Amino acid sequence: MSVIHVGDYPGSFPNVPGQPGVVSPTYDWTEEYTIVNATLAAAFDRVTVAAYVENLFDDRSINYVHPEAFVDGKYGVNRPRTVGVRLGYAF
């Protein structure tokens, strides 16, 4: 199991370049978030089987702010919960 915690932070410099004290219209902060990943595996003679979950609690916090004016592409969020199985074979 792994736990990754990231605090909030500014997405860019707050002011318009060359204009001290004028806040940029594209300035914003990311959100604080915690991602929990878990894996359970069993190893046999030549085969390994593992079940995994990434982003266990499906945290969809904003983790990236792109400095552009269009809201559609401005914010990036954590990847959604992913569940799967991995198989390995040693030749």
Image (cartoon, rainbow, N blue to C red):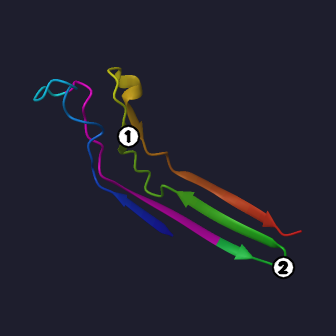
Cβ–Cβ below 8 Å for labels 1 and 2? no
Of marks 1 and 2, the one in the foreground: 1
Residue found 40% across the figure and 50% down from its top: 59
Residue 46 image-quadrant placement: bottom right
Residue 82 in the image, given as x and y percentages of width and height: 56, 51
Amino acid type at mark 2: Asp
- In the image, what residue occupies the spot 41% across and 61% down? 4
x then y, percent, for residue 65? 34, 36
Q: Is residue 38 magenta?
A: yes
Task: Say which element carries label 1.
Answer: strand
Q: Residue at x 29, y 37 (%)?
A: 12
Q: Residues within 10 Å of mark 1 (few under 14, many from 20)?
A: some
Q: Label 1 amino acid?
A: Tyr
Q: Which residue is situated farthest in the top direction here? A: 70
Q: Which mark is residue 54?
A: none
Numbered range of the magenta stretch: 24-40
- Classify 46 as above or below 28: below
How many marks do you count on the picture? Answer: 2
Q: Nearer the viewer, residue 82 or 35?
A: 35
What residue is drawn where x is 70% and y is 75%? 42
User: Residue 23 lies in what quarter of the image?
Assistant: top left
- Image quadrant holding the C terminus, namely bottom right
Q: Is residue 43 above or below residue 86?
A: below
**Residue that mark 2 sits on:** 45
Q: Secondary structure at mark 2?
A: loop
Q: Check the image and report above or below for 76 versus 39.
A: above
**Disc marking residue 64:** 1
- Among numbered discs 1 and 2, the one appearing first in the sequence: 2
**Camera-side residue of 30 and 50:** 30
Horizontal side of 48 relative to 13 (left or right) equals right
Distance of label 1 from label 2 (alpha carbons): 44 Å
Please state the horizontal and vertical placement of residue 62, each as a whole percent of the image.
35, 42
